[in-house]
Amino acid sequence: MRLVGVVLGCLSALPGAVFLLVAGAALGPWPRARPLLMAGARRLAALERRRRAVFFGDRFPGAYEVPDRRILRYLAARVGAGLVTGIVLGLLVFGEVLAVLLVRGLVRGSLGWPELPGQLLLGGVLLYLDVQGLYALAALDARLARACFGPSEEELLRRRIDELALSRAAVVQAVDTERRRIERDLHDGVQQRLVALAMLLGRARRGRERDPEQADALLRQAHREAQDVLAELRDVAWRVYPAALDSLGLEEALGGVAERCAIPLRVRFDAGDAPLPRPVESAAYFVVSEAVTNAAKHSSASTVSVAVTRTGPLLTVRVEDDGRGGADPAGSGLTGLRSRVAALDGTLHVDSPLGGPTTLVAELPCA
């Protein structure tokens, strides 16, 4: 297949050379013909891209815009490389013909044995140089295609730097959002309950001598309130970071989410026996916890299913509920999850049409 691709590359260099000559001659007197000529250049480049994809298995970005100047530079370099490759292939075929003639001369006796070592040495050196030339030209063809049809190394590095800068800013914002949420939970939940508990104890203390029975009732109510405060503190602590994640692992921590969930929650865990990195476990846990909390509070769901699977170096977390849908992917909760996942070079997909169901899929690299 690769040899066929090389031969086709040599043949396609001929129309490319003709096109460049015609284009160079036409752009001088008729500059308005440039759009038509560029359309032809892009067609030739598309054929070369198809050749690389079919015969060499190259994969290029689908929606990558190539500037006109880069297209022309690629065609010029490609034509030169293709013509030189054709010459090298021709020399290789010529060498094979000479090898056949050498063998025939030995059989017929027209070539003496003393001359054979010199002929073999010369032929071996030329064959080595020919094959090395073919390898170098094939590598050049691949580099030219990558430089034209895909982002260059400089562009990839620049994109990666931009992604890391955005990811860092998103992580900082997610941490601030999480802190505000914890402060709100403590202020609106735990603090209010503690104020109510203090008031109950104060009433019980003041009425202890006048009405002992009412004081006992107030103390019992204060005891229940203290238990509720402890339960809410545990919930807040679990939302900050579950201790079971470090001591028991992700599967047991997800079991704790199922126990605390207000609606039926089914968990399927199939992550293999190999241990997961701690950051991946933490991100997977918070994805499930946030998605389940949103389903219980906002979607009117009756059931939620969670599937955690590991395929090679990728951990996939899938959460699906049968609620009414309409979740906003740009909401603060999902944005924070997306930032947490992106910090690990993962992706988060949310599908929540009106009427449901809502499906959230996080893919986390864990290699």
Image (cartoon, helix red, strand yellow):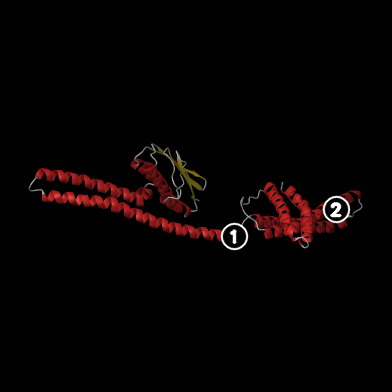
Q: Is residue 132 left or right of residue 280?
A: right
Chain-order first, disc 1 or disc 2 = 2
Q: For mark 1, give the secondary structure.
A: helix
Residue 129 seen anywhere in this rendered image of the structure: no
Q: Residue at x 19, y 47 (%)?
A: 222
- Tell which of 106 and 303 is nearer to you: 303
- Residue 324 position in % (x across, y down): 42, 39
Residue at the disc numbered 2: 98
Residue, x 41% and y 45% (percent of image)?
A: 291
Residue 4 is at least partly visible in this image: yes
Which one is in front in this view, the residue at disc 1 or the one at disc 2?
A: 1
Give coordinates of residue 242: x percent, y percent: 35, 49
Left or right: residue 129 versus residue 282 is right
Residue furthest out toward the bottom: 28
Crowdedness of circle 1 by 10 Å Cα count: few (<14), some, many (20+)? Answer: few
Say which residue label 1 marks. Answer: 155
The amino acid type found where label 2 is placed reads Leu
Circle 2 packing at 10 Å, graded few (<14), some (14-19), many (20+), is few
Q: Residue at x 65, y 54 (%)?
A: 149
Task: Give the total of numbered labels.
Answer: 2
Residue 147 - label:
none
Residue 108 rendering spot, x and y as whole percentages: 91, 49
Give the residue displayed 49% in from the left and 60% down from the top: 165
- Tell me the element at label 2: helix
Q: Position of residue 66 (x, y in %)?
A: 65, 56
Residue 196 sits above or below residue 136 on the image: above
254 above or below 154? above
Mark 1 residue type: Glu
Do the CB atoms of the residues marked 1 and 2 lie less than 8 Å apart? no
Query: Looking at the image, which residue sits at the far left?
Result: 210
